[in-house]
Amino acid sequence: MTDTLPSAAAPDTPVEAFPVLAVDAVEFAVGNARQAAYFYARAFGLRPVAYRGPETGSPETASYVLEAGSVRFVLTSVVRASSEYAVFLERHVAAHGDGVLDVALAVPDAARAYQLALARGARGLRAPSTARDDHGSVRTATIAAYGDTRHTFVERGGYRGRYLPGYRPLDPPGPTAPPLVTGIDHCVGNVELGRLDEWVAFYQRVLGFSTMKEFVGDDIATEYSALMSKVVADGTRTVKFPLNEPAIAKKKSQIDEYLEFYGGPGVQHIALATDDIVNTVRQMRAAGVEFLDTPDSYYDTLGEWVGETRVPIEELRELKILADRDEDGYLLQIFTKPVQDKPTVFFELIERHGSAGFGKGNFKALFEAIEREQERRGNL
């Protein structure tokens, strides 16, 4: 199978397609993995399924793996920083607070993926290596992306363990409830002013992604702030990475605020797919998750342009869920407030009914809601 490699070769030069299958896991570097795991289990309904730490032969770091549907979060913190990697993790948390370290990508051949990525200009961080246990083997390799973010290529093959060799299975007590979230819809990255096109070109050149959507100019702007965004995705649109940069405006945009408090580029938010956004929002609110507020006036005319949705307008109003429609269908979405003290990482819940968009009709309402939070924090 071949496709065209942008910028690195002539437009008609056939090259090998990059074999991305899905997002394998999102790994967070956090200050206290045990407490973070408790939060995501209670607040997001994720199930703890595996653990690695001093008790399993990993004396310097502790990692908890939580899953729901095809969502997999790995939460890692430092126990003792004497190795180079543990020192890096400790510095990552010191510089950024709790944040996304790695958006790992499932691939059929990690060594080949790594070879292709380096040949196309990526910076290698860890060469291909294989880990084994009684459940089989997993091969991984890692490249650098924007800021301190990285992508690990994961080749699982027929591995039968819970996560990776070296992890101990965890069995949560009680019956397994239906998951509140079912998959990772997209991961959004923020980069510095003037570097958006550079990173779009990186994903096009290195991973063979294409530009799925572009939002520029007045697409994402309010009276006070603005940003520019482009969405890159693999050929099947299974893996989608919107990328944002700030735009010049009267006041500080949410991207400026993120870059300031995160200390540079990084993953801003993760959109989690759900089959029942009403139930998910109700349960997450009851568990203490805070969502952005939307004025009642938004819902006064919503039905006129979004049409009929699975959830009645009054229920959307009650729960502050947004709706948008395009030529392919509609979607329902809502955004949490930042889930740590720094105004950095937050989450989106999204329920799709045909629409492959990102809620363009809601951009103004969403960013005005974010600006209200920025103003409360004194950062607008």
Image: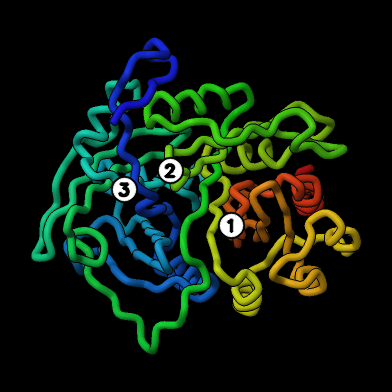
Q: Is residue 63 left or right of residue 189?
A: left
- Density class for disc 2 (Cα within 10 Å; few <14, some 14-19, many ≥20) is few
Q: Quadrant of residue 310?
A: bottom right
Secondary element under disc 1, as helix, strand or loop, is strand
Report, in whole angstroms, how far the alpha carbon at label 1 lies from the one at label 3.
22 Å
* Quadrant holding the N terminus: top left
Numbered label attached to residue 283: none
Res. 106 mark = 3
Could one spot residue 350 in this view of the protein? no
Residue designated by label 1: 347
- Amino acid bearing label 1: Phe
Between 348 and 3, the residue placed more toward the observer is 3
Front residue of this view, candidates 305 and 53:
305
In this orientation, which residue lies closer to the viewer: 322 or 196? 322
247 relative to 373, above or below: above
Figure label count: 3
From the top left corner, tell me how far across and down residue 79 is, in percent.
Answer: 32, 59
